[in-house]
Image (cartoon, rainbow, N blue to C red):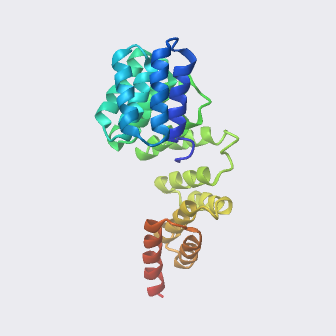
Amino acid sequence: MKRCCSFAACLGAAFAMISSGCGDGTPEQAMTRAAAFAERGQWKEASQIAERTARKHPELVAAHVLRAMTAERCGDRGAALDAARRAVELDPESFEARYTLGRLYAADTARASEAEQVLLKAWKIRRDDLRVKILLCNVAMAMNSPRALGYLRMISGVPEVKDSAALKNQFAVSFVRKGDMTSAQRYFAAAFRVGKNDPEIVLNVARFYDGCLRNSQVASRLYREYLRVAGNDAAGRVEAAARLSRLDGGK
């Protein structure tokens, strides 16, 4: 699931850390300027300010968190990881520091196990945060871990997402990975009922009927439905059209 894990939410939380507890107007002003650059998409300028602030105030956890996020946006994953690790070292009980480090690890499938360890510690600090629950689920699914279903069930207790197409889709994918196609079909059908106007959901359900159930009739109908709702998703349109052509040609 990718919802509720937005970069903007992380950035907002980092600035909340600064304004709520730095006690020194100088770093706060610097970080406010960085925020203004970030909001305009000027990540290089924001990153430079965050880096200078972290050097000048090495004890300021929020500066390292912001440096991690802006460095990531500038494509410097090494600097981003260094900054996130430093933030965790400074304050092991900082949720934002641990979440940022876990999120960076989660972006690399080779570090999925490390991501899970860091994110579990973040979850223990703030058990009601939906972002960390979703990332834990994503990481477990990347590892093909049986724990994915447990994380999904944990997420399903959150009122704002329990009936969402995205959650039902994620349950379906988890069952596919377990080889339980009956349960997967049930959840994909539920996901489609809720998200029939969501291109991502429709295309994923079509792929399932095409690749897993080999039901060309249903898959063709779903690919056509996807093309109706796809909007400007050029890559998805190309994929759906190619798959539809193959299915129609096989009749």
Residue that appears at 65% across and 51% down: 164
Residue that appears at 59% across and 52% down: 166
Considering only vertical position in the picture, is 221 above or below 20? below
Considering only vertical position in the picture, is 158 above or below 95? below
Give the image location of residue 212, x and y in percent. 48, 66
Give the side of residue 167 with respect to residue 67, left or right: right
Give the image location of residue 211, x and y in percent. 46, 68
Quarter where residue 46 is shown: top left
Quarter where residue 127 is shown: top right
Most foreground residue, 182 or 173:
173
Give the side of residue 76 with respect to residue 248, left or right: left
Considering only vertical position in the picture, is 21 above or below 222? above
Give the side of residue 241 with respect to residue 52, left or right: right
Residue 114: tell me if it is visible.
Answer: no
Give the image location of residue 41, x and y in percent. 44, 43
Residue that appears at 54% across and 32% down: 12
Most foreground residue, 97 or 130:
97
Residue 228: tell me if it is visible.
Answer: yes
